[in-house]
Image (tube, rainbow, N blue to C red):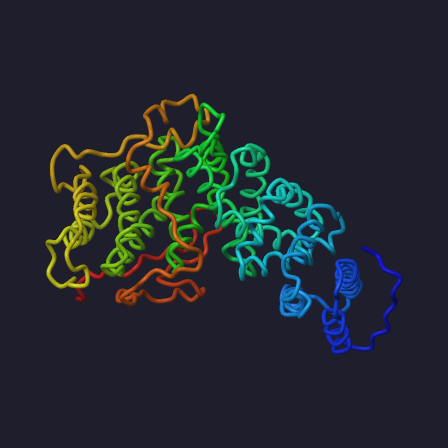
Amino acid sequence: MELEVSYSLDNEQQFWDELDDIVSAKCSTHELIDNTLRSYLHFTTTYKGEYLHTDYDVARCSYKLLESPLFKTHTEYVRHQIVYCLLQDDSPDILHFVTAFLLFDGKQDETTFEVLSNEGGFPRLLELLQVAQDQDAGLHRTLLQLFFEMSRIQRIRNQDLLLIEDDFVIRLFQLIEGLSDDVSDPYHYPVIRVLLVLNEQYMVSAHDPGPGTIYTSPIPNKVIKILSQQGHAFKTFGENIILLLNRESEISLQLLILKVLYLLFTTKVTYEYFYTNDLRVLVDVMLRNLLDLPFSAKALRHTYLRVLHPLLANTQLKHAENHYKREEILKVLHMLVGGGAGLTHFGAIDETTKRLGSRCAQVSWLGAVENGNENGDESSKFLSIGLNSKAGESSLSVVGDKVAAHIAKPGEQAPSLGNRFEGQSNGNGVDNGVSLKNGNGNGNVGVLTSPFEVES
């Protein structure tokens, strides 16, 4: 990518003016386009250390090219050339700019992510993520974002999923633990999202192996496998996905979190992965979200209810000393199945909501009915991890199939009636009294205000 071109710049404005000139070049042949792309990458990497200090600066360079006549006129060719550069180049600086370009291009046009996947992008990103973690934090963060966006909009091929090693997943969990006190990235969002989307890909593969598959058993879910074996060492991930669920309004991201929770609560060895205080916070979040969803959000409500049942039935909340807000839970379930006055936004209650709500109410410690039909270990088909415990013996349930199959378009926001039961900030910038956890179980976990508490 090196060119025999020299520049003499005196200030940052000259840098941006020169970049504008480069991407504005008129190119009538592929050779001229290639020369312009080389100039773009040579110029940006040459002055990266001097004028491009933030992710915003790198993004600005990407949009200069994205909005240029060059790209608008030769979109497909430029896109493919940038993809090939990602696949072939090893310079961290060049990789940073091409990764950023593909990320922002793909967010505008998902065709980019499809092209990247078809050209072998998944194995390449796996490779680069492992190398960049120790070399360039900015590149690593951008690679994580590209990996997530590419994986969330399309199914990853089974042969690509098989390339993921245990060590890759373990390093992601370790990264979250290592940054647990980093206030500049309190949710470790890019890393967490990669783990969430990998879990979904494993679930989709188990739910539907795909046409012409040659595999006789599901691909092991490495995310749940590692938490099953080493969950005690990776508590921060669990704590922070609860915080994310509390704040997330995008449907697809809520679903990614709920799918991980479902598997954790239906796998015996991870029934008690979470601290009890965190489970109480999760109950509050789920009750609030169930009440806040309007009539139109049936599918999302169904998924919440499918997760709520094993949360109540299988975790340490089932023990007498840990019972939590029994009356409030029953009131919400009563409203959801059509017995409540005052939640008129639900309209006519659909039969699935009635069935799932009634099923939750049958959890034995709630006492709504006797001999509740509690969840067994329903996630074995998703895991296939060869654990020695008796967890994972039963086959995939219909409930598990429904959770795996529920997807939403990226960017779609959850409809809401407004957060009528919004709690107060705890002073740490986290909504509803929930503060960032540091992995020791002793973080300041506040309790969300219940809509049923009576003021004294």
Q: Residue at x 43, y 45 (%)?
A: 238
Q: Is residue 87 above or below residue 419?
A: above
**Closer-to-camera residue (364/210):** 210
Residue 332, located in which quarter of the rendered image?
bottom left
> Quadrant where the C terminus lies?
bottom left
The quarter of the image holding the N terminus is bottom right
Left or right: where does residue 300 sit relative to residue 63?
Answer: left
Residue 405 x, y percent position in the rendering: 36, 42
Nearest the camera: 82 or 356?
Answer: 82
Q: Which residue appears farthest toward the front when viewing the image? A: 28
Q: In the image, residue 134 lies at what x, y percent?
A: 69, 46
Q: Which of the 4 image quadrants contains residue 4? A: bottom right
Q: State whether residue 54 appears in this view.
A: no
Q: Is residue 223 visible?
A: yes
Q: Residue at x 30, y 47 (%)?
A: 303
Tell me the residue at 12%/35% (across/down). 370
Say which quarter of the image contains residue 356: top left
Counting labels gives 0
Q: What percent of the width, then of the height, locates residue 88?
A: 73, 46
Q: Is residue 24 above or below residue 48?
A: below
Residue 424: image x %, image y %?
34, 67
Residue in front for this viewpoint, 254 or 420: 254
Q: Is residue 205 left or right of residue 61?
A: left
Q: 232 or 188: which is nearer to us?
A: 188
